[in-house]
Amino acid sequence: QSALTQPPSASGSPGQSVTISCTGTSSDVGGYDYVSWYQQHPGKAPKLMIYEVSKRPSGVPDRFSGSKSGSTASLTVSGLQAEDEADYYCSSYAGSNSYVFGTGTKVTVL
Amino acid sequence: QLQLQESGPGLVKPSETLSLTCSVSGDSISSRTYFWGWVRQPPGKGLEWIGNIFYDGSTYYNPSLRGRATISVGTSKKQFSLRLSSMTAADTAVYYCARVRRFSDYFDYWGQGTLATVSS
């Protein structure tokens, strides 16, 4: 059970869009539509932003969107705002009631 | 509103066992809709799933922990616990408890986390 692969960093100017990838295998991301994304500000607990690949929990701005193609999932943040600067982690169901997280991406708003 | 709160010693000696408790308010561990789980994060590093427990006591663990983790539910059904044996410096981390939505498989509520440091 290896961690899902994410780019270490991503950045964009306010108002622009940034997309983060999350690459796994057919045993996790590619095998199930149970990919979720979490935002984590320094010193805080992770916060659920996307679940089941592309669904947004109540209260999460529609600037956040998710998608998946094969074994790679993606999170797009449109209309970047200063408060979007944070670490982002993907997670996937990996079968047999097990889960795997991504390596994490630090998003910087320039 | 659901709230989760971790508690336990902040310092553990090498080779000893870490014991943490997660107190749940606003929901019951008896719910069949959710797992209750533990996730950890070493300083400056990413998240790692440790394991989950279901209300009936069924448990599921990350194989990478090689049998060192044990999760249990308290008799009040308002607490669940983690024990991690044979602690080493590599186990130094912030430990989070979380609720996991079954069949959609996402972590929807998290505790604030508690730092456990392994040091003699």
Image (tube, coloured by chain):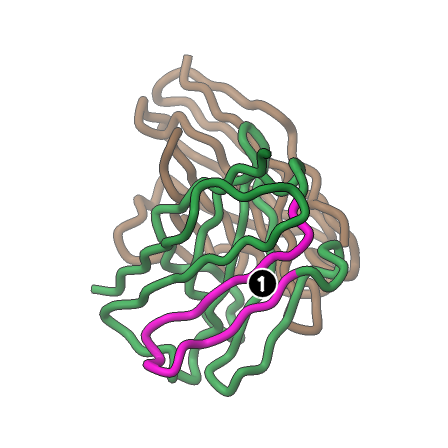
Chain colours: A brown, B green
Please tell me whether mark 1 sits on a helix, a strand or a loop. loop
Where the N terminus of chain A falls, by quadrant? bottom right
Where the C terminus of chain A falls, by quadrant? top left
Q: Give the residue drawn at x 47%, y 66%.
A: B81
| Residue A75, x across and y down, in percent | 52, 41
Q: Is residue B80 magenta?
A: yes
The single residue placed furthest to the left in the displayed view is B1
| Residue A89, x across and y down, in percent | 54, 41
| Residue A45, x across and y down, in percent | 39, 43
Disc 1 target residue: A34
| Residue B40, x across and y down, in percent | 54, 47
**Horizontal side of residue B24 vs B56, given as left or right:** left
The single residue placed furthest to the top in the displayed view is A110
Q: Chain of mark 1?
A: A
The single residue placed furthest to the bottom in the displayed view is B56
Q: Is residue A9 above or below residue B34?
A: above
> In the image, which residues are magenta?
B69-87
> Foreground residue, A82 or B93?
B93
Q: Give the residue drawn at x 57%, y 56%.
A: A35
**Horizontal side of residue B111 vs B55, given as left or right:** left
Q: Give the residue drawn at x 41%, y 45%.
A: B114
Q: Is residue B72 above or below residue A29?
A: below
Bin the neighbour count of mark 1 within 10 Å (Cα to Cα): few under 14, some 14-19, many 20 and up.
many
Q: Give the residue drawn at x 50%, y 19%.
A: A11
Q: Is residue A5 above or below residue A83?
A: below
The amino acid on which the numbered mark 1 sits, given as a three-letter code, is Tyr
**Horizontal side of residue B35 vs B91, given as left or right:** left
Residue B5: image quadrant is bottom left
Q: Is residue A43 magenta?
A: no
> Foreground residue, B61 or A35?
B61
- How many numbered marks appear? 1
Q: Is residue B35 above or below residue A45?
A: below
